[in-house]
Image (cartoon, coloured by chain):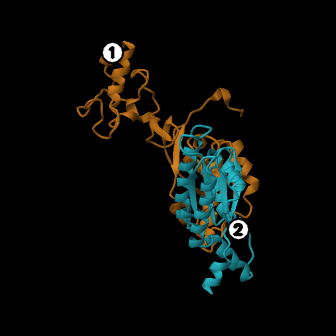
Chain colours: A orange, B cyan
Amino acid sequence: MIVAEAKPLEEILESLNGMSRILIVGCGGCVSVCLAGGEKETGILASALRMKRELAGEPLQTAEETLTRQCDPEYVQQLAKKLEGIDCILSLACGVGVQFLAEHFPQTWVLPALNTKFAGATLEHGLWEERCGLCGECVLGQTGGVCPVIRCAKSLLNGPCGGSQNGKCEVKPNECAWQLIYNRMSQLGRLERLMDVAEAKDWSKSRDGGPRRVVREDVKLDG
Amino acid sequence: MEKRDSESFNPKIIAFCCYYCAYSAADLAGSLRLQYPPTVRMIEQPCSGKVDIRLLLQAFEEGADGVYVAGCLEGDCHFLKGNIRARKRVNAAKKILDKVGIGGERLEMFNLSGSMGPRFAEIANEMTERILQLGPNPLNLIRTERVNTGEEGDHK
């Protein structure tokens, strides 16, 4: 899932300066699962904003709506009837949702309430960690299911580096990804696979160079 | 003038009480004919862990001067960890209330057992005393002022 966390309340309040009627939109997708932007978090933020603004002598009227997802047109369109008279939309989606709302409603000011962090997994309730670097060409098949692109601080494809000490990374207090890869390959009896040298990765498939696209002609509805 | 204001301040305190402890303790306090202030309005919960941050903020937004959550003694929760989770949520809500300007000290978490009737009355007194010292919820002050100056408007 895409993991996000709430922006500081002060920052959100500052972005809402001069606004008196806002639509706060939660997202029932990833940010709901990582407890940052679901229906409950939308309610909490709305209540906090209303109280703070009322105390500041500038009452804020809020409407709340939580869409199933903010990254699909059919759900985003549901907001069309709710925009009348509002000064802005405050979105609790990831950066995708915020942009998608802005694209669909060109006349409406859209503001983010979250900072989008990474593509990750839930390690335990309340703890999420990055797992995928969205590099566009998966190497997990060569590394025993442990991603060196995102879990190695240096994204080494032929690791470990000289800074791996006692299984720990020298950059951050994390497990060394290449130690994890070694352990897993060892456990699976496939250590010999690590003798294969990975060639230079094709980074043109990664994030640089503008937005990437996936096209599936077989599922497109037009034509 | 100030004295008259504080004398006329009759706090509204919401107590979210776990059915298995605080609610029974309140019953016991009643049976024991223990006096506690009428400022406390109890809301029965199946467990203190049922309380979430939204509910706590809603109470303040709707004018409560103080709020507390009363759950079982730690380790004695009927649902094992509901009271531990409630405490975490209360602490998170306190931080939000501090940022908002209501003040986190208006919110508290208490632990007691169903047999602690006197403690229930003590908590009600303690919380009432605290809120009397803190004064009214600042939102209420602003709303009263708005009514007095003839300004209208719904806060939502």
Which residue position holds label 2? B155
Give yes or no for contact between labels 2 and 1 (Cβ–Cβ under 8 Å): no
Answer yes or no: is residue A103 visible: no
SS at circle 1: helix
Which of these two is toward me, A221 or A83? A83
Q: Is A14 placed left or right of B58 in the picture?
A: left
Residue A191: mark in rendering: 1
Parent chain of label 2: B
Give the farthest residue toward the front.
B32
> Quadrant of the image for the C terminus of chain A?
top right
Three-letter code, disc 2: His
Residue A166 drawn above or below residue B43: above
Residue A195 drawn above or below residue B143: above
Q: Is B62 placed left or right of A123 in the picture?
A: right
Three-letter code, disc 1: Leu
Which of these two is toward me, B47 or B26? B26
